[in-house]
Each structure stands twice: as structure tokens, then as C-alpha cells.
């Protein structure tokens, strides 16, 4: 994002004036300085920084990061940290309440499965961003007792507690799952897809790797399916002996994945790169033949459209979120299990013409998603809520 105020951001400024919103407090778990940050933090940063560029006073409250200052300004957003990883759920609302005054006009609540219970403490217009349904994921990352409590809250408590608060879903399939599985009123759930940053773009054809290269990118968490991705790559390697693969990201599964690669003696062609720079990510997307995502749970799958913007088709699991990020059979291929993922990779690695056709379609598909439009559409929901409250 440049410093220029685009037409979309001018619309944010106009809607802010119409709705009487000058200062927005956002509450979230983490920010981009947290080593465990992932897609939801990127999503929040892209939206909030654009609201700041449009002239709003934006404050983001998150958990404390070891070695990082309690306060910092990033791209115009005031970031305030307190409470640590889990204390953030108490410290964030408490910090907002401490700062609430006549110039605080709205709250954005960034959901992480377990949320901040804004209806109990926010009396200003409030909108939540709901990334995806977490029910099954809770049992992958939490102790059994805590997982059951979290799942109960998501299924039984939140739809009632937030029944008069608008939420943002990242895709139509997430909204459909919220309605069918959790019982949300569809009238309260608004779909706003994530954007794609301008740095993700196609490059000249010679930028592609001369050898088949598959890239997978994301936080190394159980629900992201990287163990399955390695199994798929090991299978495909038997039929494509020149295959190379790079997995980018870090997280609690790193040690187990390293051990899996060592056990398979795959270190010569399958590399776990850890975190890399933004420029390196773009280069990998542009060099890759295919992006692989074996994730079991996504709100959208931002790496899919980022790679697509670079002209790289995707092979991904047929799950909520992926079904809009990938246009099956057009911008990539969806599969329901490891065998299907392997077969889809075989197909694209073996067919240069189809791969190029899908890559071009992926770039065209990704071009419709821009962060300025995402920021404006999310703000529209917040402004509409402020005007509704004013009329009621």
C-alpha cells in the first residue's frame, strides 16, 4: 500500500463523516510483531492501516509480545499491547474501556474462535470479523475440557449473545457454515473477501523454475495440514523424480515436520524454509509450478489468491473458504483427501498447457480482490451499524 488515498479510501472517509465515526478501537489476539502471527493478523493490518490512511484515528489492542514495546505505531495504527497470549482476552477489552471517551465511536472485534464478548462491554457500534468455524479445530489445539467449553460457546452462546451485532465472514461458504452449523441469522452475516496486495503479480515466463516446484505457505499448525502435504509430496515424488518443494512458515508443528522430512530422507528436495521475507514469498510464488494447500480449515485461504495473482494455480483441499479462493477446474483443482491432492498435483505437473491456462485464469480471478475494496466494504458494515443505532 502506498501513501496515496484512493477512491475507495475517500469513500471510507465520506462514510465515516456520514456515520459520525472518527475513532475506532479494534481488539485482537496478536499483531504482526508476534512470532505466532498468521493470516488473521495480516488481514487486520491491511484493513486498519487503510482506515488510518483515510483519516480515522485507529487503535488496535492485542496481547503483549516478549521484547516488544507496549505501544507502537504501524502504518498509522496505534498498537497497544497488554496481557500476554491468553490474558489479551481480558486486557484488550479493559484497555478499550479505559480509553473509551466521547471520541471513541466504534469497535472492531477480531474473532479467534474464543472472542472478546463485546456485547458485555461495548455500547458503541461494534462489528466482528469471523474468520471460520472453529468447532473441530478446538479439539486439535486445546486440552479436551477447554475444547468442549470453547465449542459450546461457539455453538450455543455466541449466536445468541451477538444476535443483534453484525459479523463479517470472509467467504460465502463460511457464512453458509455459520448459518447451517451454528445457527446464525444470515441477515447479520456479511461476506467481505480478503484482498491481495499489489506486490503479488505475474512475472516473465523465464522466472518459473526449470524443475517442477511446489510451494506451500502458512503457519505450521495442526489444522493447516502440513503433515498431510508432506505425505502428498512424498507420494508425488515417486512419479515426478525431479520434483522440488518448499514449505514456508513456522509454528508448533515445525519440529514434527522436520522429523518427518528427515525420516523420509527427503531433505535434499523438500525444504522447510521457516519464515522468509515478503520479497522471497513473491519470488517463490512466481517460480512455483503449483501452490499446495492441504489445510483442513480456512476462512478463505489467502495464499491461494496471492499465488494466483502471480500466475500460479493451486491444488487445495475441498473445504469451506477454499471453494471461493479456488475456482475448481479453472484456477486450480480441489480434492477431498490426500489421494485426490496427489492425483491433482500429478495432473498439473504433467500438463504444461493446462498449468499455464489455469495460472492465467488464477491471475485474472485474483485481480478482483484488492485490499482497498476490502477495507471500504468492512467499513460500510460498521457505518451502516452506526446509522442503524442512531435511527433506533
Image (spheres, helix red, strand yellow):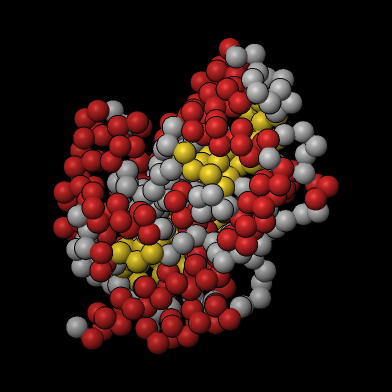
Question: Total number of numbered labels?
Answer: 0
Task: Tell whether 311 sits left or right of 152.
Answer: right
Percent from the top left, x then y, of residue 292? Answer: 57, 38
Residue at 43% in and 43% down? 318
Between 101 and 133, the one lying in front of the other is 133
Percent from the top left, x then y, of residue 244? Answer: 70, 29
| 132 relative to 48, above or below | above
Percent from the top left, x then y, of residue 231? Answer: 53, 23
Percent from the top left, x then y, of residue 213? Answer: 70, 35
Tell me, yes or no, if residue 78 can be seen here: no
Between 247 and 351, the one lying in front of the other is 351
Classify the position of the C terminus by image quarter: bottom left
Between 84 and 259, the one lying in front of the other is 259
Residue at 20% in and 47% down? 155
Classify the position of the N terminus by image quarter: bottom right
| 260 relative to 368, above or below | above
Residue at 30% in and 82% down? 387
Residue at 55% in and 30% down? 342
Tell me, yes or no, if residue 85 can be seen here: yes
Amino acid at each position: 500500500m502506498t501513501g496515496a488515498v484512493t477512491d475507495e479510501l475517500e469513500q471510507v472517509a465520506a462514510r465515516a463523516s456520514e456515520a459520525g465515526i472518527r475513532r475506532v478501537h479494534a481488539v485482537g489476539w496478536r499483531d504482526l510483531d508476534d512470532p505466532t502471527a498468521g493470516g488473521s493478523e495480516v488481514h487486520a493490518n491491511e484493513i486498519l492501516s487503510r482506515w488510518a490512511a483515510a483519516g480515522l484515528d485507529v487503535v488496535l489492542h492485542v496481547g503483549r509480545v516478549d521484547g516488544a514495546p507496549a505501544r507502537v505505531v504501524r502504518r498509522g495504527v496505534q498498537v497497544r499491547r497488554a496481557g500476554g497470549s491468553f490474558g489479551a482476552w481480558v486486557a484488550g477489552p479493559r484497555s478499550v474501556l479505559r480509553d473509551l471517551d466521547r471520541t471513541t465511536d466504534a469497535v472492531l472485534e477480531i474473532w479467534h474462535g474464543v472472542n472478546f464478548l463485546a456485547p458485555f462491554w461495548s455500547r458503541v457500534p461494534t462489528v466482528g470479523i469471523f474468520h471460520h468455524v472453529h468447532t473441530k479445530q478446538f479439539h486439535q489445539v486445546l486440552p479436551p475440557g477447554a475444547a468442549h467449553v470453547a465449542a459450546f460457546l461457539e455453538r450455543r452462546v455466541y449466536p445468541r449473545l451477538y444476535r443483534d451485532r453484525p459479523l463479517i465472514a470472509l467467504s460465502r461458504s463460511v457464512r453458509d457454515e455459520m448459518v447451517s452449523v451454528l445457527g446464525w441469522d444470515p441477515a447479520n452475516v456479511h461476506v467481505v473477501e480478503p484482498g491481495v496486495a499489489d506486490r503479488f503479480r505475474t512475472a516473465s515466463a523465464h522466472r518459473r523454475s526449470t524443475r517442477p516446484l511446489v510451494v506451500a505457505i502458512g503457519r505450521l499448525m495442526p489444522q493447516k495440514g502440513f503433515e498431510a502435504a508432506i505425505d502428498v509430496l512424498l507420494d508425488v515424488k515417486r512419479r515426478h523424480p525431479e520434483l522440488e518443494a518448499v514449505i514456508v512458515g513456522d509454528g508448533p508443528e515445525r519440529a514434527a515436520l522436520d522429523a518427518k522430512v528427515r525420516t523420509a530422507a527427503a531433505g535434499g528436495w523438500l525444504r522447510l524454509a521457516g519464515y522468509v521475507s515478503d520479497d522471497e514469498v513473491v519470488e517463490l510464488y512466481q517460480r512455483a509450478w503449483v501452490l499446495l494447500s492441504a489445510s483442513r480449515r480456512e476462512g478463505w485461504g489467502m495464499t491461494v489468491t496471492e499465488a494466483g495473482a502471480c500466475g500460479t494455480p493451486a491444488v487445495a483441499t475441498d473445504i469451506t473458504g477454499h471453494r471461493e479462493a479456488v475456482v475448481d477446474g479453472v484456477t486450480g483443482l480441489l480434492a477431498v483427501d490426500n489421494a485426490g491432492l496427489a492425483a491433482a498435483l500429478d495432473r498439473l505437473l504433467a500438463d504444461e498447457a493446462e498449468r499455464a491456462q489455469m495460472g492465467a485464469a488464477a491471475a485474472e480471478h485474483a485481480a478482483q480482490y484488492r485490499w482497498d475494496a476490502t477495507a471500504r466494504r468492512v467499513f460500510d458494515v460498521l457505518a451502516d451499524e452506526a446509522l442503524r443505532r442512531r435511527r433506533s
